[in-house]
């Protein structure tokens, strides 16, 4: 009996040892795929750009930066030299452009000294920063940019990976006037796309979430299309001093504090039929002269918002048949200029002006312009929001509302849902 007991204990000890060895091996194997990307660790160079192997088994690498330029003031030369190179020196800009600075194109596939092929899937945090760079081309294989692209003073163009689901970073790029958000992007992470020179921002329907401080302090941003956005974190679009109007989409359910605060030139705000949870938004915006509300029945007025709006002068435009309701509703009744407008036109309605036709759809107006005439799209306040000379058919993406399509000093109204 005693011998049987000791044999059982021995078996348990051996089993425990085997399990420990297996667990250690599993950890060692998984570590190959889960190790943190160190931007200063470079395993090899390819065409002058450094790469770190982040998964040997999957042959995946990340773009790295083995030097520290984070706090280097007054950089006079690009960190990568103006010559193509395949040696291990770390130098090699791919080509020149007509812009200030060069162009860096990250390839999809790179090779180490032994000729082993790796796919470029990541950019290490801070890997591409403080360079005199005019254009950056990222491959479609990139899965994460890890806040790796920032503080590129001269950057004027960036080509994004088409399958990128999250955007992390791309901030402090004051000369970056436009960026095309990939149509598969769902989330824009905290602090991303802030302090850039964007003149307009079109969020595709796939984008549902903006985390805190997205698109904050973009001084040149004049137009923004939010499409099917659902939630916004705090301080999104804060201090965008050039922004003239904004229309919140029907899909938006929550805005964090300080969104659209301190937008000094903001004049027109459109609120959807859907009630939005918001607090301390649209403050520090004394230029707001009109608030357009699409809800036929007044929601509870957001008392912590619109604090600096002159309610005796600001127009409150409401749907037809709703004026009396708003004049009796708490908060809304403080506006002295409440008027109605027919905000809902038939979605399939088609309006013609000579040879020009336009049809309102969800999120855009489809224009047919066979003669290639100049067509202006105006909002209901007479502000031009878009224009086109395109001969044939073109789609003009717009926020929900009523617009006037004008050509040859004549116009007609079209509704965008």
Image (cartoon, grey):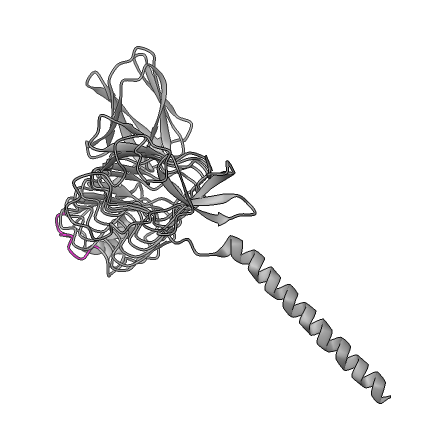
Q: Quadrant of residue 95?
A: top left
Q: Point out the residue furthest to the top here.
A: 371
The N terminus, quarter of image: bottom right
Front residue of this view, candidates 275 and 262? 262
Which residue is rendered at x = 22% and y = 25% of the image? 98
Numbered circles on residues, count? 0
The C terminus, quarter of image: top left
Assess whether residue 311 is covered by the magenta stretch. Answer: yes
The answer to whether residue 186 is visible is: no
Give the image location of residue 275, x and y in percent.
Answer: 36, 53
Give the image location of residue 245, x and y in percent.
Answer: 23, 41
Front residue of this view, candidates 392 and 354? 392
Q: Quadrant of residue 255?
A: bottom left
Left or right of 57? Residue 80 is: left
Q: Point out the residue furthest to the bottom here.
A: 2
Front residue of this view, candidates 350 and 170? 170
Q: Which range of residues does the magenta coloring cover?
A: 306-313
Front residue of this view, candidates 73 and 113? 113
Give the image location of residue 139, x and y in percent.
Answer: 42, 35
Give the image location of residue 180, x and y in percent.
Answer: 34, 35
The answer to whether residue 24 is visible is: yes
Left or right of 110? Residue 24 is: right
Assess whether residue 145 is covered by the magenta stretch. Answer: no
- 357 in relation to 168, above or below: above
Main secondary structure type of the part rendered in magenta: loop
């Amino acid at each position: 009996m005693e011998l049987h007991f000791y044999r059982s204990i021995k078996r348990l000890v051996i089993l425990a040892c085997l399990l420990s060895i297996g667990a250690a091996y599993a950890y060692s194997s998984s570590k190959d795929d889960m190790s943190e990307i160190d931007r200063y660790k470079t395993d090899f160079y390819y065409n002058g750009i450094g790469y770190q192997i982040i998964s040997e088994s999957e042959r995946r690498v990340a773009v790295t930066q083995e030097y520290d330029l984070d706090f280097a003031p007054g950089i006079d030369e690009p960190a990568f030299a103006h010559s193509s190179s395949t040696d291990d020196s770390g130098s090699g800009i791919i080509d020149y452009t007509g812009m200030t600075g060069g162009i860096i194109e990250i390839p999809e596939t790179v090779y180490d000294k032994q000729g082993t092929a790796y796919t470029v899937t990541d950019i290490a945090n801070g890997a591409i920063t403080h360079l005199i760079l005019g254009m950056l081309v990222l491959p479609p294989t990139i899965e994460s940019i890890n806040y790796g692209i920032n503080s590129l003073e001269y950057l004027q163009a960036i080509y994004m990976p088409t399958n990128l689901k999250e955007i992390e970073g791309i901030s402090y790029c004051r000369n970056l006037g436009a960026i095309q958000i990939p149509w598969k992007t769902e989330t824009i992470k905290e602090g991303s796309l802030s302090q850039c020179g964007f003149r307009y921002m079109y969020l595709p329907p796939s984008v549902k979430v903006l985390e805190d401080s997205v698109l904050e302090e973009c001084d040149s941003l004049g137009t923004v299309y939010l499409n099917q956005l659902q939630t916004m974190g705090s301080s999104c679009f804060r201090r965008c001093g050039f922004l003239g109007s904004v229309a919140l989409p029907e899909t938006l359910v929550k805005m964090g504090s300080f969104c659209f605060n301190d937008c000094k030139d903001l004049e027109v705000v459109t609120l959807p039929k859907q009630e939005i949870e918001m607090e301390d938004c649209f403050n520090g915006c004394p230029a707001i002269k009109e608030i357009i509300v699409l809800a036929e029945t007044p929601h509870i007025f957001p008392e912590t918002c619109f604090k600096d709006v002159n309610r005796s002068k600001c127009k409150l435009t409401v749907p037809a048949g709703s004026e009396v309701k708003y004049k009796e509703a708490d908060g809304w009744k403080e506006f002295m200029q409440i008027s109605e407008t027919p905000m809902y036109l038939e979605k399939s309605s088609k309006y013609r002006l000579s040879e020009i036709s336009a049809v309102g759809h969800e999120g855009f107006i489809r224009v047919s312009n066979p003669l290639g005439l100049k067509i202006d799209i105006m909002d209901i306040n007479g502000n031009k929001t878009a224009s086109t000379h395109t001969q044939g058919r073109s789609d003009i993406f717009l926020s929900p509302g009523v617009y006037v399509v004008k050509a040859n000093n004549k116009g007609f109204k079209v509704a965008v849902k």
